[in-house]
Amino acid sequence: MFELSEEQQELKELAARVAAERFRPKALQWDRERAHLPQEERRLLGSLGLLALSIPEEYGGGGRPLMDALVVLEEVAKASPVAAWPIFEASTGPARVLEQFGTDAQKKKYLPAVASGETTIAVSISEPNAGSAATDATTTARIEGDEVVLNGTKRWCSGAGYSEKYLVYVRFGDRKGAKGMGAVLVDKDAPGLSFGPQEELMGFRGIGSADIILDDVRVPLDDVIVPEGGFRQLFTAFSIERLGNSTMSLAVGQTALDRTARYVEERQQFGKDIVEFQTVQSGLADMVVQVEAARLLIRRAAENAGTGAPSSLEASVAKCFANEMAKKVSDLAIQLHGGYGYAAEYEIERLHRDAHGWAIAGGTPAIQRTRIASEYLGRRFDQRG
């Protein structure tokens, strides 16, 4: 069940080969230096057709099912999350919002540059007082003629300061909650747009995160991607993003498992391989079970999505499980590596740091549990009630 086709297997092998040759040797350095992926590497991914597999061909993408993009994303992420980040953004992130809800003119204008690696679009939703409660956002959008004037501060924007474009979630007018929300595409060099200092995060090093300050930023009205009142539509795009997030967690878990399996067969204590100890076998078996279960949940949701979006329930189940799997499995990897698991050069501790980041991003497991209950029961729960 959920076996890869021959074509998907070829994609997987291509992505793994490129990742091993180009990105794996630099992963530790990029993490230590918090280095962003060089644009030439992003262009390489675009030239190989790996960057925007799930974007329709008419806009420069691969026109492939979501599963194909996730297969590539996992292989690259296993080598380096920094290298995988533009794939995540293009195939499962804000570029998909544009592809799902933008006009034909907007798609033709912006998506080919995303697919080629010339442009990355980052998403900016959170604010100082609006995280999980995204519809509490106060960043305003005021329409003046053929322009939209933006004012406010966005927080925790992954890719801030590096990405060329930003899909900024804003409030049109005075309507509260989801009814007043929409999204506007903003250029990095727009007058009045500035960035706060780069955050010193536990993980996600090299991806970048900073505040975005919008001070009377003027954007063409044509760059409104989601008009006022369209926020609820975005749960479709959020479900796609959650499978991308789940796959990044899967890459953490699979990498931790692969490295631990090699280590316990090489490391000796008391005159024998440590894998001969039953406690080690039990820990390794727990890792295998967790990783395989996460992969099946992701593949179920992706297969059912085809070239569209997965169901909200299946995406939230996959994200909730995969996020927590990555934390558990990377923690077990540290334990089974002993002192080496605590050393930066082995990168096991980096996997654990990144695992926690993916669990926070895109809706925490706590929020996913609320969505899972809501979707399963077919009823809404008012968090403000």
Image (spheres, rainbow, N blue to C red):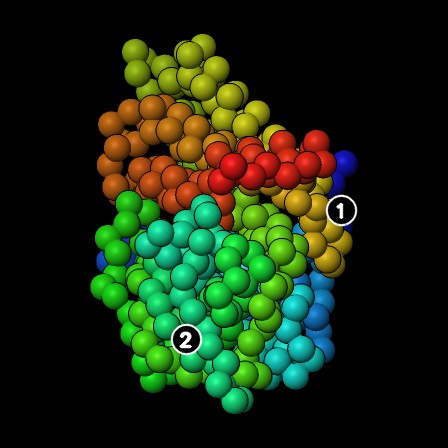
Quadrant location of the N terminus in the rendered image: top right
Asked whether residue 147 is in view, the answer is yes
* Residue at numbered disc 1: 304
Question: Residue at the location (46% across, 48% down)?
Answer: 133
The amino acid beneath tag 2 is Leu
Q: Is residue 100 left or right of residue 358?
A: right
Mark 2 vs mark 1, CA separation in Å: 38 Å
Disc assigned to residue 321: none
Q: Is residue 265 above or below residue 51?
A: above
Nearest to viewer (mark 2 / mark 1): 2
Say which element carries label 2.
strand
267 sits left or right of 90 in the view:
left
Q: Which comes sooner in the sequence, label 2 or label 1? A: 2
- Pick whichever, 14 or 253, lies toward us: 253
What is the x, y in percent for residue 231? 59, 59
Please tell me whether residue 26 is drawn above or below residue 182 in the rendered image.
Answer: above
Q: Disc 1 marks which amino acid?
A: Asn
Residue at image point 36% right, 24% down: 336
Residue named by callout 2: 150
Q: Residue at x 50, y 74 (%)?
A: 185
Residue nearest the viewer, comparing 380 with 101: 380
Could you say whether the residue bearing mark 1 is in a helix, strand or loop?
Answer: helix
Percent across and percent down for residue 32 are: 25, 53
